[in-house]
Image (cartoon, rainbow, N blue to C red):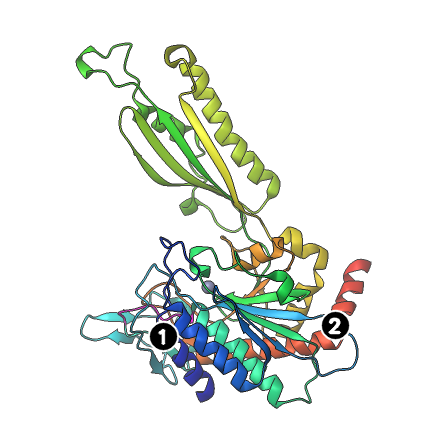
Amino acid sequence: MQHIIDRFVSYVTIDTESDPSSNTTPSTSKQWDLANKLVEELKTIGLQDVTIDDKAYIMATLPSNVNHEVPTIGFISHFDTSPDFKGANVKPQIVPDYDGKDIILNAEQNIILSPSYFKDLLQYKGQTLITTDGTTLLGADDKAGITEIVTAMEFLINNPEIKHGKIRIAFTPDEEIGRGAHHFDVEKFGAEWAYTMDGSQVGELEYENFNAAGAKIIFKGKSVHPGYAKGKMINSLLIANDFINELPKDETPQETKGYQGFFHIHHLSGSIEETILELIIRDHNKFKFEKRKNLIAKIAKKINKQFAKQFGEDIVVAEIKDQYYNMKEKVLPVKHIVFIAEKAMREIGIKPIIKPIRGGTDGCQLSYKGLPCPNIFAGGHNFHGKYEYVPVESMQKAVNVIVKIAELTADGAYQQTETKSKKS
Ligand SMILES: [Zn+2]
């Protein structure tokens, strides 16, 4: 346990906040500080082919210790932290034998991590929690994942009686700004499938995410002195308002959950002459996703028709761009990769929690680049803020899951589940 704590603390105390406004990779040069340290550590624990490229993507190999053919599998996490909250000067607090009561993160500023608000805390009574000091995020997202992968590899190296095939691991920059998979060399990685260790609570196993698109809608207008405007002025602000009113009222993020999709307006600005509306479209279902995009085009068309005579050209221009797709499509044909993770969890007494992600992961982009990649829990809670915490026991469980997946794969479990799923 102390070993995991020490390793985790050594990572989170290095600031690796990413920056969406930067065009470089990694987006912030400070991410190299942890990346370089990780490379040294991977070499020290005895991994092979440890590489880091000019964009700070790290890869390494644990060679197979069996004579028979086993598919190469991978484990991936990201070392940047979210720009949503301060990631510098993280001072982790260790709370041993958590008593189920309020945890004072910062007495001076009266910042309290309370189970009356964060009910999940209560399931960790008696465990060792790592929290922030209330002034920064923790960075368990996703340095818990890195801790787990490194610890699992070290464990397999030190316990050669546990049989496994070739394992590849990778750590990426800039996941939090949506670019973690952008420069990921799937071919070089060379795994048949992989898992991101980037989920939240113990048991989480995810292989479905949203299909995603973004739309920028431009409304034009005609400005005329309000006193002389009758029949002449066209107010683009009001047309944007008409457009919004045509969207289904109850299909917003705040009104939906589970598999329900939505339209989410996140930007609106303008004046009489021009208004710009930006929204995102999300749906797990491919067909419904297309329908949502069509609705945007249909509303634009309707308004354009209304103003065709008066304005003379299209008064609404909708630009819709696909952002990412549901990885389910790429994972279902190789469903055994989910079965193995599920089986691994059950065999060590963890109940798998399988639910759709209401967002995207690096794994979904990787899945479309040819590396099917479900997401597994890393153990942390309340990501991207000062209430972030992680139970050490959860990290240990994730380590055990990685080891078990390696073992089951070498055992041929992927073949068993495959034939079973074919029969049923
Ligand atoms: Zn993450």
Q: CA distance from mark 1 to mark 2?
A: 39 Å
Which residue is disc 2 drawn over?
413
Q: Residue at x 62, y 66 (%)?
A: 189
Q: Residue at x 69, y 89 (%)?
A: 161
Q: Is residue 222 above or below residue 7?
A: above
x%, y% of residue 115?
A: 35, 70
In this view of the protein, which residue sits in the foreground, 244 or 62? 62
Q: Is residue 204 above or below residue 6?
A: above
Residue 69, picture quadrant: bottom right
Q: Residue at x 56, y 84 (%)?
A: 154
x%, y% of residue 234?
A: 31, 18
x%, y% of residue 133?
A: 28, 74
Foreground mark, 1 or 2, reads 1
Residue 287, picture quadrant: top right
Residue 135 highlighted magenta (yes or no): yes
x%, y% of residue 289?
A: 56, 40
